[in-house]
Every structure is written in structure tokens, then in C-alpha cells.
């Protein structure tokens, strides 16, 4: 069984759904609600992304709590701002394990931590995203003014994944304002060597909205960010399944096929 | 309700399909049926593409869906969104240059 990451640490699992198929054994691990949700998608690609991501989520979490993937039960925490039951998805009380799931394009990213955690990944859109500048925090929007259009598009998506990671960590919906706090400005990045047998590396974090925020190394064409609740100078990051091998690596179970 | 210079539902729906296809980078959405849900299944829009869609509707039609529909019920399907935009669009504010939302 995998240990729950200690304070200030997070495990990250990547999956390239382009490398996997989901068959009957995997579908049998999903709940009735997940099956209903999967069936509601109009397009096969969305259905496939959803099912692969949730099979992967169940299998990853199973490795930490020693419960079969199909037996895991999820609950929804209340939003800390409005109390509606649409906050962070969570395991039942008592596990001391927190997680966050994000998917976009072919990429699925799962973050696991011993404290509230939020992760987001976005495939760089092919069209113009400058319209989102209107939603940015004013301080963050300033960073885009001197940039050319391509660089501004990168910045907007970098802002988005960082801001959404913070909101997923806090459990607040974006309806409460994704631009209410700045998430850009302070550069963060690796500040220490890999720790043998432990977390891969220490990444300097930026404080944002009560969270410690880092940009994650992401596949080409994607951007990703991770937020941990509370204030730490750096997040110890362990990439348990890197993108290049994610299709073949899982904890204690066969790969998603 | 349509009037002089005001685009009808079919035109608005077609424009919205183009906005959706451009915002998501998914050309198949240009043929979306009116009864297809936009979130929680259906098209499977995520928060990024949903927000981008709202911003581009505001640019294209001068309609601020989020400000006028706090529960975002208008975003249930393409049909409900079409009705919402059609009822509020001001002809003078319709941006005729599609490059605004085609990102070109």
C-alpha cells in the first residue's frame, strides 16, 4: 500500500488516454452514477476520456487505502463559500487522503496528498483565448499586456490552470470568481535535488488564496498546476506515473485497457 | 422574438454552433443539435471552454449571460442558450466580423 504523502508533499499521476482502451473489466469498476454520467455524453471521445479518467482515479486511490477500486465510495464536500453540495469530491472521512482529478484532451492528471489539494490541466486551445483576459485578476492581466499574441495565449492558460487549481483545492466553484486573487508574478520552479527513495523534488511555491501553488511539468501542448492547502515555501512533488509511461503504470493493478 | 435587423433563432443557433466549435477546437460541434446538453454530459464542456463561450457570446452578441442568468440555466442546451441570446440580442451590438470568435 502506498503511504499517504506527508505534509507539504503531493503525488502526481499522469495518464495518456491515447495509450489505453477501457474494456468490460475496467467498466465494472465504475459506480452506477459514473456509468450514467458516461452514458450522457454525446460524443464518444468525451465518454472515453471520462471513463478512463475515473477508472484511473479509482485504481490510483485504491493503492493508497487498500480497498478494491470498485468498492470506493465518493462524497461531495460542501462549497466553503455557499454551502451548496458542489465542493471538492472526497473519500469518506477517516482516510486522511485528499485527491484532485483533472483531464483535458488526452491527458489525465491525478494529485494525491495528505491535505487539501487541487490540480488542473488544460490542452492549449487552438483558437484565441484573449477574451478570458476579462476574467483575470487585474494584477495577473498586466503580465499579458507587453506580450505578443502567442505568448499571451500561453499566459492566459497558465493563469487559468493556476487559478483553477487553487479553487479546486479550496473547493470553491469558479462562479465565486476565478479572478478574485492573483496567481501569477512570483516565479516558481525546482529549488532542490531529487530525494532518493522519496519525493522527486522540491518545487518553490507561490502563496495564493491560502494555498501553496506550483506549475506542474506537463506534456507538450498542455499546461498544468497544483495547489496545496496552507502556506509552505515549497511543495515536495513525486511524479508516480510520468506522462511517457503513464499508460502502463498503475499501483497494484493491471494497466487500464 | 425577432424584429427588423434582429437575427432569428436559426441564425443565432448557427452562430452559437460556430462559437462553440471555435472555443473548443472541435469542428463536430458545428453540427450540434438544439437539445444536446452543454455541461454534465452532452457536449462535456469544461469550465475553461464554458467561460470562453460566455466571453465570446458577450463579444459577439453583446449579451452577458452570466450577469443576467446567475444560475446559468440558459446553458442547459444549445436550444436554451439560443432562446436566451435571441431574446436579448441588440442588433446594433452584433459583431459582424466572425474573426472575433474564430480567433483568426
Image: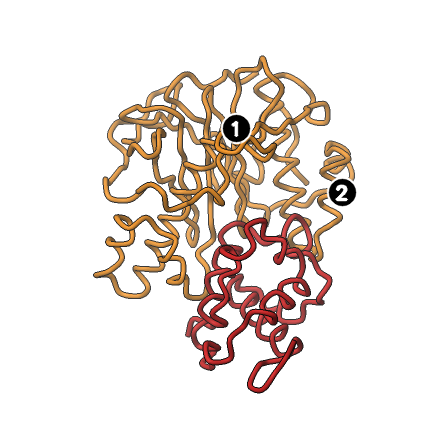
Chain colours: A orange, B red
Describe residue A121's horizontal placement relative to residue B82 as left or right.
left
- Residue A22 in percent (x, y) is at 70, 43
Other-residue count near label 2 (Cα within 10 Å), few / some / many at <14 / 14–19 / ≥20: few
Q: Nearer the viewer, residue A40 or A217?
A: A40
Residue A89, numbered label: none
Residue A99, numbered label: 1
User: Which SS class for mark 2?
Assistant: helix
Chain that bears disc 2: A
The residue under label 2 is: A36
Q: Nearer the viewer, residue A178 or A121?
A: A178
- Residue B12 in percent (x, y) is at 60, 75
Q: Nearer the viewer, residue A216 or A193?
A: A216
- Residue A25 in percent (x, y) is at 76, 35
Residue at 32% across, 48% down: A137
Q: Residue furthest top?
A: A94
Vertical placement of residue B56 versus A115, above or below: below
Other-residue count near label 1 (Cα within 10 Å), few / some / many at <14 / 14–19 / ≥20: many
Describe residue A122's horizontal placement relative to residue A152 as left or right.
right
Measured Cα–Cα span from mark 1 to mark 2: 22 Å
Chain that bears disc 1: A
User: Which SS class for mark 1?
Assistant: strand
Describe residue A67's horizontal placement relative to residue A64 as left or right.
right
To which quarter of the image does residue A34 belong? top right
Vertical placement of residue B65 versus A15, above or below: below
Vertical placement of residue B72 versus A83, above or below: below
Q: Are marks 1 and 2 in contact (CB under 8 Å)?
A: no
| Quadrant for the N terminus of chain B in the image | bottom right
Amino acid at each position: 500500500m502506498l503511504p499517504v504523502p506527508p505534509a507539504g508533499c503531493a503525488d502526481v499521476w499522469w495518464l495518456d488516454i491515447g495509450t489505453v482502451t477501457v474494456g468490460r473489466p475496467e467498466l465494472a469498476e465504475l459506480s452506477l452514477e459514473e456509468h450514467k454520467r458516461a452514458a450522457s455524453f454525446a460524443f464518444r471521445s468525451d465518454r472515453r476520456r471520462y471513463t478512463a479518467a475515473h477508472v484511473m482515479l479509482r485504481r490510483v486511490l485504491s493503492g493508497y487505502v487498500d480497498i478494491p477500486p470498485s468498492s470506493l465510495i465518493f462524497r461531495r464536500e460542501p462549497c466553503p463559500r455557499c454551502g451548496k453540495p458542489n465542493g471538492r469530491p472526497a473519500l469518506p472521512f477517516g482516510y486522511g487522503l485528499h485527491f484532485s482529478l483533472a483531464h483535458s484532451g488526452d491527458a489525465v492528471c491525478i494529485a494525491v496528498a495528505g491535505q487539501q489539494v487541487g490540480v488542473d490541466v488544460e490542452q492549449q486551445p487552438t483558437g484565441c483565448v484573449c477574451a478570458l483576459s476579462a476574467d483575470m485578476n487585474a494584477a495577473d492581466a498586466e503580465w499579458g499586456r507587453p506580450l505578443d499574441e502567442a505568448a499571451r495565449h500561453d499566459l492566459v492558460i497558465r493563469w487559468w490552470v493556476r487559478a483553477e487549481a487553487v479553487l479546486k483545492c479550496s473547493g470553491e466553484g469558479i462562479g465565486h470568481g476565478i479572478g478574485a486573487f492573483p496567481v501569477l508574478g512570483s516565479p516558481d520552479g525546482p529549488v532542490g535535488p531529487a530525494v532518493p527513495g522519496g519525493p522527486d523534488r522540491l518545487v518553490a511555491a507561490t502563496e495564493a488564496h491560502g494555498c501553496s501553488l506550483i506549475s506542474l511539468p506537463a506534456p507538450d501542448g498542455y499546461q498544468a498546476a497544483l495547489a496545496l492547502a496552507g502556506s509552505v515555501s515549497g511543495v515536495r512533488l513525486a511524479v508516480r506515473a510520468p506522462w511517457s509511461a503513464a499508460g502502463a503504470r498503475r499501483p497494484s493493478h493491471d494497466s487500464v485497457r | 422574438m425577432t424584429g427588423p435587423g434582429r437575427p432569428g433563432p436559426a441564425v443565432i443557433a448557427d452562430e452559437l454552433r460556430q462559437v462553440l466549435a471555435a472555443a473548443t477546437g472541435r469542428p463536430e460541434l458545428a453540427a450540434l443539435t438544439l437539445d444536446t446538453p452543454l455541461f454534465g454530459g452532452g457536449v462535456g464542456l469544461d469550465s475553461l471552454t464554458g467561460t470562453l463561450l460566455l466571453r465570446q457570446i458577450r463579444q459577439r452578441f453583446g449579451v452577458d449571460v452570466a450577469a443576467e442568468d446567475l444560475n446559468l440555466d440558459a446553458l442547459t442546451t444549445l436550444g436554451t442558450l439560443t432562446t436566451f441570446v435571441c431574446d436579448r440580442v441588440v442588433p446594433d451590438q452584433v459583431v459582424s466580423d466572425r474573426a472575433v470568435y474564430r480567433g483568426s
